[in-house]
Image (cartoon, rainbow, N blue to C red):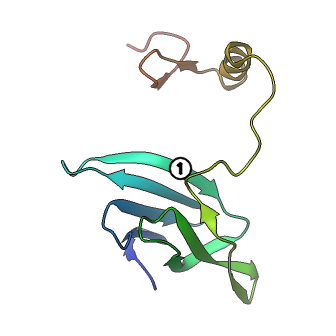
Amino acid sequence: MSGVEWGNSGSVAFSPDGHAVLTARLRWVLLWRLSDAHKLTPISARLLDGKWIGGYRFDDRAGMATKLAVLDTADTIRFDAVHHFDRPDAPALEGDPNTLVEEWQQRLALRLQADGTIAPPYPME
């Protein structure tokens, strides 16, 4: 199955139940929740271990488990392992959350605002 393509190697597809939207482009795939008010809220993003070529398969109606077709080598295609968007794909970082956030803000030269948005550490005019 292939979703609706946009731009250069991008795609959009709806989950079987119609409440999630899968977007993908090259090495990234994102899952969004579609509200009754037709607003999209990001659920999760995954970095693929190969170049995504446009094929996918939902393994559940809600779209939380998805297989994606990726290039394994220059001429070999494989359906990647199921990506479970409803659970983390890596263990949590150890340490104090406030210290971790502060360290990453310094490394990235960005500030995490109280409302969850990301901004530069200096005022923008």
Against 1, residue 125 (above or below) is above
Element type at marker 1?
strand
For residue 21, side relative to residue 99 (left or right): left
- Among all residues in the image, which is located at the extreme top? 123
- Among all residues in the image, which is located at the extreme bottom? 75
Q: Quadrant of residue 11?
A: bottom left
Q: Nearer the viewer, residue 7 or 105?
A: 105
Q: Nearer the viewer, residue 31 or 27?
A: 31
For residue 67, side relative to residue 43 (left or right): right
Q: Quadrant of the C terminus?
A: top left
Picture coordinates of residue 13 (x, y %)? Answer: 38, 71
Point 50% across, 56% down: residue: 30
Q: Is residue 27 visible?
A: no
Q: Is residue 78 visible?
A: yes
For residue 80, side relative to residue 36 (left or right): right
Picture coordinates of residue 62 (x, y %)? Answer: 42, 64
Q: How many marks?
A: 1
Q: Amino acid at mark 1?
A: Ser
Q: Quadrant of residue 7?
A: bottom left
Picture coordinates of residue 97 (x, y %)? Answer: 69, 19
Point 30% across, 67% down: residue: 18
Against 100, residue 27 (above or below) is below
Picture coordinates of residue 76 (x, y %)? Answer: 74, 88
Tag 1 residue: 44
Against 124, residue 4 (above or below) is below
Point 65% across, 20% down: residue: 105
Point 64% across, 20% down: residue: 109
Against 21, residue 104 (above or below) is above
